[in-house]
Amino acid sequence: MPKSDTRILTTHAGSLPRPPELTRLFADRSRGESVDEGALAAAGRDAVAWVVTKQRAIGIDVISNGEQQRESFVLYLRRRLGGIGGEGDRAPFADVESYPKFKEERARAIAARQAVSNVAFLPKCTGPITYIGKAELDAECAALRAAGAASGGSAVAPFVTAASPGILASIVKNEHYPSFDAYIDAIAAALRIEYETIVGSGFYLQIDAPDLALERHVAFSKRPLEDFQRFVDRVIAAINTALVNIPRNKVRLHVCWGNYEGPHDHDVPLADILPILRKAKVGGVYLPFANPRHAHEYKLFAHQPLAQDQMLVAGVIDTVTNYIEHPEVVADRIERIAKALGDPARVLAGTDCGFDTSAGMGRVAEDIVWAKLSSLVEGARLASQRLFA
């Protein structure tokens, strides 16, 4: 994990707004419509160059490709994994179901968007899981390298995201393997190729694992907490197996409760899963602390510390509201988190989640996204002056 002994470094959770035409192409394809794949590929490469330039101009330290060449943080895998096809389904979110009027309003807002859904048009597992996406992944890494070189390069290597075995297993219904254990192991074995390719290409790896918190109020909403904790433990074990050949300091694990504006009053407390998350063989744990449901939970690190060689990537910018956080607010959040952790050099400042985790579904206007990231950079500068004085 990148680290500085003189200031707080900044990053974000991966996805950034996509240009409208790229979003349209992804949305059309997700509905089964025919699209010009050459035009889509070209639009994706152009978008990577655009977001890399924007991040450099703002001053983000640890940047990404913005997931511009993927339609979703997880459903991109429908083209990279063999054994996936057909049409599946997914359990509803318990907090949304608990508020019928909100559910209706949310459904109307989503229906009005030209976007890719992470809950509709889902595939299912119909055969052996294999990795068939190496060429596409290589092209994605090449586009990021080219964009970085064109923008002048950086002292800090960019990161590339990849889905966790658990989130894919959660949203892609298993109709092939005899057990969940067999299914999650097959996914982890396939994703090991993706993880190793990303790191081998010179990038940091971020594993996106919302399943490790989100699924408590989705697939496990009617089951005991202990069942969910066993699921989290099993997924962490699968992730560790997939990372066997990767140095832990090259990996950060992003965990969240779902990147959507909603009640979130069914979210599992971080205290119930943190002891299990700490088993992950990664160099950094990435958690959201800007949103109003989990902003207080950084305090846990004063009593449940991470390993001495692990970083905390702390979300200090909300990704589902158009409020632009004041830099002083950002600085205050960073300082409180650093105090709880006990070492400011082990804190990276980031966003709670991505801004467009599924193409077109982002709640924050594009120009405000860049303003929020600018506030992140300024807030980190202010906090650094105080923490490293």
Image (cartoon, rainbow, N blue to C red):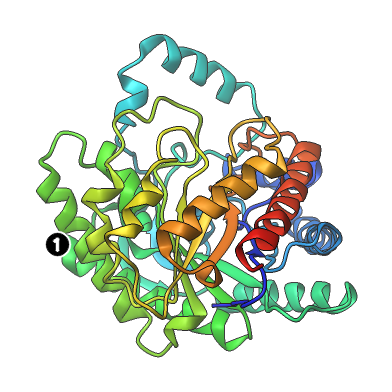
Residue 91: x %, y % from top left: 29, 35
- How many numbered marks does the figure carry? 1
Q: Position of residue 280 (x, y in %)?
A: 32, 72
Using the rendered image of the protein, determine whether residue 69 is visible from the camera's viewpoint.
Answer: no
At 76% across and 37% down in the image, what residue appears?
Answer: 368
- Front residue of 385/350: it is 385
Query: Residue visible at 80% across and 75% down?
Result: 148
Instruction: Answer left or right for 33 relative to 342.
Output: right
Picture quadrant of residue 235:
bottom left
Q: Is residue 326 above or below residue 197?
A: above
What residue is at 63 percent from the left and 76 percent from the top? Answer: 4
Compared with 306, 192 (above or below) is: below
> Which quadrant holds residue 248?
bottom left
For the residue marked with disc 1, what is the amino acid?
A: Ser
Between 179 and 62, the one nearer to me in the picture: 62
Per the image, the residue denoted by label 1 is 179
Quadrant of the drawing holding the C terminus: bottom right
Residue 214 location (% of width, % of height): 34, 44
Instruction: Check disc 1: other Cα within 10 Å, few if <14, some if 14-19, many if 20+.
Output: few
Q: Residue at x 12, y 49 (%)?
A: 227
Left or right of 199 on screen, residue 10 = right
Residue at the far front: name it. 389
Above or below for 255 versus 330: below
Horizontal side, residue 282 vs residue 1: left or right: left
In front of the other: 380 or 374: 380
Is residue 292 at least partly visible in the picture?
yes
Quarter where residue 302 is shown: bottom left
156 or 383, which is in the foreground? 383
